[in-house]
Amino acid sequence: MLDLKDRYEASILLSAIGDALGWMTEFVRTPQDLETRFNTNRIDKYYQWNKPVGGRFHGYIDKVNAGDYSDDTQLLLAVARSITKQGNVDQNQFAKIEFPQWLLYARGAGRTIKNAARKIQRKSADWNNNFFSFKIKEQLVDYRECGANGAAMRILPIVLANHSNWDKIKKEVFANSIISHGHPRAILGALLYAYLIDQFLGVDKTAFSPKEFIVGLGKEFEKNFILDFMEQDEFKSWLNKWNENQDKEFKTVYQEVLKETLVYLRILYKGLENDDVPLDVLKKLGCLAPQTKGSGTSTVLGGLYLSLRFFSKPTDGILEAVNTIGSDTDSVAAFTGGLLGAIYGSSIIPEEWRKVQDANYLERIADDLYQIHCGTSTKEVEVNLLISSESIDKIESSKYKKGNRVHFTSLGLGEITNVDFQKPLTKGKFNLILSVTFDLGQTCIFHALLNGEVPETKVEPNDRDLISEIRELSELNLDTDLKTKVYHYLGDVPDERVLGIIKDILQKAFDVKK
């Protein structure tokens, strides 16, 4: 008998785990770069690392804790909170509250998804009317051209809430996808991932044949992805808008992408049949080419391929995604993890991987979705913002302190666990970074670029001990330039983690000189 509840938990957890592991390698360019950053030639566990964010003049360092996930999982959770106890997605809730508010705590997000979240805030925009354009350098990108995987990466909760009801899943996933992405590669990528999860949840893993699964998928492919709801008013208005002043109508482009994806499925099948090197197959699926590496269809197919290629060794499939340098590692690893979790359950999750950020909250979300599927959900939105607390819906000053109770519309009440100030190159501005743990179980990093000088901060007792050690190290026979830089940082009194990094650097420098 299938333990469906366990599969729900594993699918959510392994999706987040794949995201967290893959985020570390997403911006690694070469094997040598990986070695330099993490002192290893292969990622198989979590590391703490630093990610530069915000560009040259206003930038700051995002201090990523071991096991932290990125935007893939953040938006997955935002969708999960937008699902009613009947399994319907409140598309307005997601489009007008969750999605735009996510911008304030987004981590690792790409241009398309961030622009979509900004544009949905227009009064004229709605979940089925968020047509927009934006520039990448001098090139204007239209919503209809947005074919990346930002839709596919967030729709897992929709499938879990409505497992075995493909018609409903298809419609809800389509509706949620078009909030941010207009190209059929993004939309079909989301629909394909949804279909695969729905199928994998019902599979008996002891009798499963990867190649037979692909054959069956290909035979019914075009039939399963017919958009038979497009004549409904809410979709018809979107379709008419999409088709305005276009050389090709949406229907035509969608059919082209269906056929293109079928070609990819044949490549995938041959890769399995010939036991080809995974990297070669992923290249043929478009997972490494700059033009297609973030495509909704290519990345989902990459996740499907790795889940089937390593079906007998499932964690190896996730690690293959994580360590395929040059691909969209976090998304492909998240898709691979979500699929393998849906078919295997939680028994395959290594204990160390369970330390992924917000693991308890992820498990609770999975349980909520299972209850919705079973028709036993009592889910209600209970956010009491009347309790004495500061709002962080808009961060416009540095008044926030560690330990303050705060509230945020989409996530409710929480507590500030850390406050960090960082100077950018631009004078007269500073970056405020707030770490917040919300009562519901999610942790977030909020950022705001503010005017003024970095506020003076009180040095906590545990910081004083660390500062003392650093000063002792800095009195050693080190370069004058290095000591000058150390005292510059100490004058700003960075937080404990930054001080610890400085100490490590000085100690290593001293060891080298010895």
Image (tube, rainbow, N blue to C red):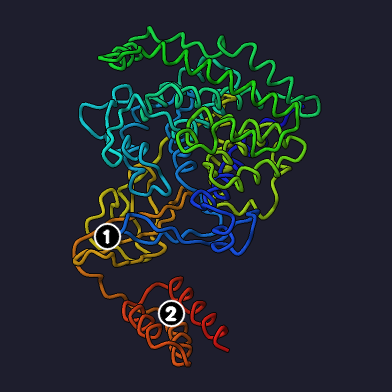
Counting from the top left corner in percent of width and height, residue 358 is at 53, 50
User: Residue at the spot x=50%, y=26% of the render?
Assistant: 189
Residue shown at 26%/57% (left/top)? Answer: 449
Q: Secondary structure at mark 1?
A: helix
Q: Mark on residue 463?
A: 2
Image-based side of 90 in relation to 197, left or right:
left
Q: Viewed as shown, does residue 338 lie left or right of 71?
A: right
Q: Marks 2 and 1: CB-CB under 8 Å?
A: no
Residue at 18 percent of width and 66 percent of height: 428
Q: Quadrant of residue 164?
A: top right
Q: Residue 511 at what x, y percent from top left?
A: 57, 84
- 316 vs 286: above or below: below
In the image, residue 314 lies at what x, y percent? 72, 40
Q: For residue 139, which quarter of the picture?
A: top left
What is the quadrant of the N terminus in the image? top right
> Label 2 neighbourhood size at 10 Å, few (<14), some (14-19), many (20+)?
some
Q: How many marks?
A: 2
Label 2 is placed on what type of residue?
Asp
Please determine whether, in this image, residue 97 is positioned above or below residue 470: above
Q: Position of residue 315 (x, y in %)?
A: 70, 44
Quadrant in the picture for the C terminus? bottom right
**Furthest residue to the right?**
206
Closer to the camera: disc 2 or disc 1?
A: 1
Given residues 10 and 224, the one toward you in this image is 224
Q: Residue at x 70, y 24 (%)?
A: 270
Instruction: Calculate the distance from the C-alpha at mark 2 to the C-alpha at mark 1.
Output: 29 Å
Q: Amino acid at mark 1?
A: Phe
- First reached walking from the N terminus: tag 2 or tag 1: 1
The residue to which callout 1 is attached is 57
Q: For residue 93, which numbered disc appears in the image?
A: none
